[in-house]
Image: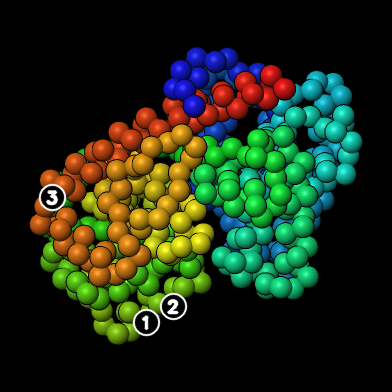
């Protein structure tokens, strides 16, 4: 994709459906912010869920809370679909459906194409894959597993353009849901980066501060970092800081019980400002260490945050990127605690390497993943849809 695409004007866009926003789901609202700043007319008719709502935590909540969420996603999107059809009769606009887009798309899939506008679906990552394989909210092999997979596939095949985060995730979606290759686009995610870009450059003194921010799910490979802490256990030289919680939090609890030294832990969900503060105190930010499978298909939000913040990024060698984006200046290792510990010790003894990697990461973010990269991708996509 040419970097000259940012000179292309954009058609008006409608936003519809029940969408997620806030620090846990920053992509949709920040994408729309960039589009408006670039001069696009955005007709926002979305029904936004509360900022503090986190989909997978809500699905593990009380029965009453879960039923309220299901009602909002299913019946709320049925109403949104009806409103969208009426609006389309008045003005047929390209329509962006924020994550989780599959619920509105499923309702629209039962309507004739002439009644639907051109649809851009924010698929981000698969709802079915996250619910069944990542978080075990739905047990594998049971009828809810099969139903959710069928629902997501049918829904995504309704969209004219399906947006995902990386090329590997795009290829997985194509194979898993039978989507058309020309309808799936891997483009950068959008974050609120103003405060991150304003953070001062790292000093990388001793102790070297290394932080992990995220949910403790299998793809993050938290046990790799815990084992790296055990191998180092030298808080005067390298200090680990963990921020987050999740289904594998017990592994950190056991490390505490065993008296492992060299790390601190802020447990629980943190606000966007708290996450920025944690990253701002670090020299090194960790990515994922879950090995093959899904961990190798993603480029998580937290790596966008770390790159924008100008922090050195240590993550596993296997990762994927948006379409047309070159390799970032990561400090990559295998998903192996010995390799991670060795790399951190190297950075501790060579602070100039840490500083140069951090600065290169921020420059990379500005060029390829920030506002410029997002607008290049979106303008090319909208031009293609307008031509159709």
Taking 170 as reference, is 327 left or right? left
Mark 3 packing: few (<14 Cα in 10 Å), some, or many (20+)? some
Residue 174: x %, y % from top left: 64, 48
Classify 28 as above or below 250.
above
The one nearer the camera, 181 or 254, is: 181
Q: How is the image coloured?
A: rainbow
Asked if the residue under mark 2 is in contact with the one under mark 1, i.e. CB atoms within 8 Å, the reply is yes
Q: CA distance from mark 3 to mark 2?
A: 33 Å
> Which of the image's four quarters has the C terminus?
top right
Q: How many marks?
A: 3
> Comparing marks 1 and 3, which lies closer to the viewer?
3
Q: Earlier in the sequence, mark 3 or mark 2?
A: 2
Residue for badge 1: 254
| Location of residue 383 by image quarter | top right
Residue for badge 2: 250
Mark 2 packing: few (<14 Cα in 10 Å), some, or many (20+)? few
Residue 103: x %, y % from top left: 75, 49
Asked if the residue under mark 3 is in contact with the one under mark 1, i.e. CB atoms within 8 Å, the reply is no
Residue for badge 3: 351
The one nearer the camera, 172 or 202, is: 172
Q: CA distance from mark 1 to mark 3?
A: 32 Å
Q: CA distance from mark 1 to mark 2?
A: 6 Å
- For the point 39% across and 52% down, the residue is 275
Mark 1 packing: few (<14 Cα in 10 Å), some, or many (20+)? few
Asked if the residue under mark 2 is in contact with the one under mark 3, i.e. CB atoms within 8 Å, the reply is no
- For the point 25% across and 65% down, the residue is 339
Residue 167 visible to the viewer: yes
- For the point 76% across and 47% down, the residue is 155
Which residue is situated farthest in the left direction here?
349
């Amino acid at each position: 994709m040419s970097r000259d695409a940012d000179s292309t004007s954009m058609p008006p866009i409608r936003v519809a459906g029940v969408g997620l926003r806030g620090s846990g789901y920053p992509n949709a609202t920040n994408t729309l912010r960039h589009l408006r700043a670039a001069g696009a007319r955005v007709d926002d008719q979305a029904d936004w869920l509360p900022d503090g709502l986190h989909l997978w935590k809500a699905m593990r909540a009380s029965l009453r809370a879960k039923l309220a969420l299901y009602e909002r996603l299913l019946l709320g999107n049925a109403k949104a679909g009806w409103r969208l059809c009426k609006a389309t009769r008045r003005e047929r606009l390209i329509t962006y459906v924020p994550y989780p887009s599959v619920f509105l798309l499923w309702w629209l899939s039962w309507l004739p194409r002439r009644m639907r506008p051109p649809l851009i679906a924010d698929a981000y990552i698969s709802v079915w894959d996250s619910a069944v394989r990542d978080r075990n909210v739905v047990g594998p092999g049971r009828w809810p597993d099969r139903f959710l997979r069928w629902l997501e596939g049918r829904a995504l095949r309704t969209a004219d353009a399906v947006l995902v985060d990386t090329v590997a995730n795009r290829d997985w979606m194509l194979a898993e849901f039978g989507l058309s290759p020309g309808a799936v686009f891997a483009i950068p995610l959008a974050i609120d980066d103003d405060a991150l870009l304003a953070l001062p450059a790292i000093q990388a003194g001793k102790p070297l501060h290394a932080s992990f921010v995220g949910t403790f799910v299998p793809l993050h490979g938290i046990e790799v970092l815990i084992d790296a802490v055990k191998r180092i256990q030298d808080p005067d030289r390298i200090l680990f800081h963990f921020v987050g919680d999740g289904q594998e939090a017990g592994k950190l609890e056991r490390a505490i019980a065993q008296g492992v030294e060299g790390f601190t832990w802020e447990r629980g969900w943190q606000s966007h400002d708290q996450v920025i503060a944690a990253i701002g105190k670090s020299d090194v930010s960790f990515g994922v260490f879950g090995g093959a499978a899904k961990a190798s298909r993603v480029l998580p939000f937290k790596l966008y945050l770390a790159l924008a913040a100008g922090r050195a990024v240590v993550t596993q060698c296997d990762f994927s990127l948006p379409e047309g984006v070159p390799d970032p200046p990561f400090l990559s290792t295998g998903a192996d605690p010995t390799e991670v510990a060795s790399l951190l010790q190297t950075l501790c003894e060579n602070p100039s390497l840490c500083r140069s990697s951090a600065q290169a990461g921020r420059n990379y973010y500005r060029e390829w993943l920030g506002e410029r990269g997002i607008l290049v991708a979106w303008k090319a996509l909208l031009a293609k849809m307008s031509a159709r």
